[in-house]
Image (cartoon, coloured by chain):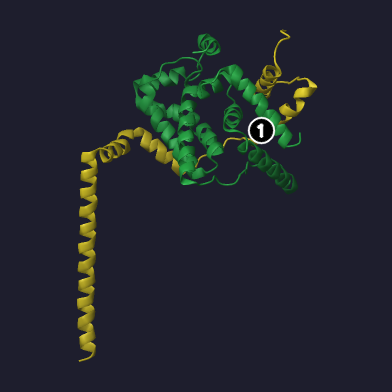
Amino acid sequence: MPTDRTAADRLDEAVDALIAGHPIAVDVTLRPALHVAQLLRETLTPVPTGIRFQAGLAGRLHAPGLGERTLRAVGSPRGRLIAAGAVSSAAVGVGVTAYAVWRTGRRHGGASHRLLHR
Amino acid sequence: MSAARQAVALVPRADPDAAAVRDAQRDHDAFDVLYRRYLDRVYAYAFYELGDHHDAEDATERTFLAALRALDGYRPTGAGFRAWLFRIAHNTTSNAMRTRRRRHTEPLPDRWDAPAPDADPATLVARAEEARRVLRAVRDLPEDRRRVVLLRFVDGMSSAEVGEVLDRSPGAVRVLLHRALRELAARLDR
């Protein structure tokens, strides 16, 4: 066995054995560090992902073009213009509809109000 | 490339993912195998790095989408597909941390709730408290040491693989790990 191995090399070898679940033999000076390695092995456990996230990402991986194409399109000057136009049109549409609903409500409310006071 | 890194690249290594990668390069639908194999591991790495489930999900998604996009250009060298994928994850989490620093937000406090169904409540509480102390200490490590610790212990990577991910020689990774574990031992009074 080579004798010129550094403490870092010996500790690394011991950590390899720890991760593989093999018996470990280290000198006394490395024991505190190896004890911490054991703690880390027990603490840094896998963190399960949510089922909805898993399914959503799997779906996006099967159709990766859709989201990316949209992002790319919005990223280009022409795409930004189209996106801005679409958003403006939608905003105008929502505004007009809201106004119409408000006017209709007001008209009906006004009629009943007048009837009540007749 | 340094001599140490060249030596690592020259070591013939059977990549357990080689067949799955070839299948996925032929047909992207077959990427599903690699996705299922590495989803939890990439997510765990991102979670321990970023300390927030939402950010970890975002980083995981970006990692896999970037990996799928770059898959056709992947050529098996050095430490294999796992190191290649984690290099993408590493870059993605680094970007997320830079963005977070610009927004001046802090990660959530440490969290640990690994189940231990056979333990009595007092033991559970004690273990959870110790785990929180360990996570806090890991989070306070300098960035390069923390990353080595996470890659080495969350996914059980070898020093050579961690070196591939972080663009360091295996010797440098071993030194970083040694310093990190000694620092943690001092902080945790071991």
Number of marks in the rendered image = 1
A89 displayed left or right of B58 = left
Q: SS for tag 1?
A: helix
Residue A73: image quadrant is top left
Write down which chain is painted green.
Answer: B
Q: Chain of mark 1?
A: A
Write the residue at 21% across / 81% down: A110
A9 and A112: which is toward the camera: A9
Question: Do we see residue A38 in this rendering?
Answer: no
Q: Colour of chain A?
A: yellow
Write the residue at 24% across / 65% down: A98
Write the residue at 52% across / 24% down: B166
Write down the residue under mark 1: A40
Q: Is residue B7 above or below residue B159?
A: above
B11 displayed left or right of A33 = left
Question: Do we see residue B79 in this rendering?
Answer: yes
| Label 1 CA crowd tier, 10 Å (few <14, some 14–19, many 20+) | many
Residue type, mark 1 in image? Leu
Q: Position of residue B168 (x, y in %)?
A: 54, 20
A15 and B186: which is toward the camera: B186
Residue B70: image quadrant is top left
Q: Position of residue B140 (x, y in %)?
A: 62, 38
Pick out the residue farthest to the bottom: A118
Q: Position of residue A6 (x, y in %)?
A: 70, 15
